[in-house]
Amino acid sequence: MSPNFFNFLFAFYSFYRFEYLII
């Protein structure tokens, strides 16, 4: 697993949490 993939996953998770927090 490359760090780039992990970084992308973390960004996606953060965005999902942010959206969930607002709604």
Image: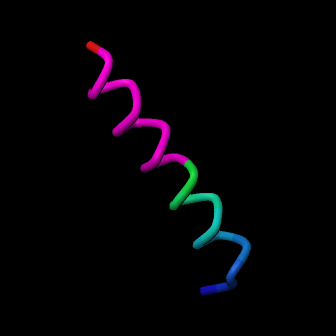
Most foreground residue, 5 or 21: 21
Q: Residue at x 38, y 24 (%)?
A: 19
Q: Quadrant of the C terminus?
A: top left
Q: Is residue 5 above or below residue 12?
A: below
Q: How many marks?
A: 0
Q: Residue at x 58, y 72 (%)?
A: 6
Question: Residues in magenta?
Answer: 12-22
| Residue 21 drawn at (x, y percent) | 28, 27
Q: Residue at x 68, y 82 (%)?
A: 3
Q: Give the left or right position of residue 19, taking residue 5 as reference.
A: left
| Residue 16 drawn at (x, y percent) | 40, 36
Q: Is residue 18 above or below residue 5?
A: above
Q: Residue at x 63, y 58 (%)?
A: 8
Q: Residue furthest right?
A: 4
Q: Give the left or right position of residue 21, taking residue 3 as reference.
A: left
**Dominant secondary-structure state across the stretch colored magenta:** helix
Most foreground residue, 23 or 5: 23
Q: Residue furthest top?
A: 23
| Residue 1 drawn at (x, y percent) | 60, 86
Most foreground residue, 19 or 8: 19
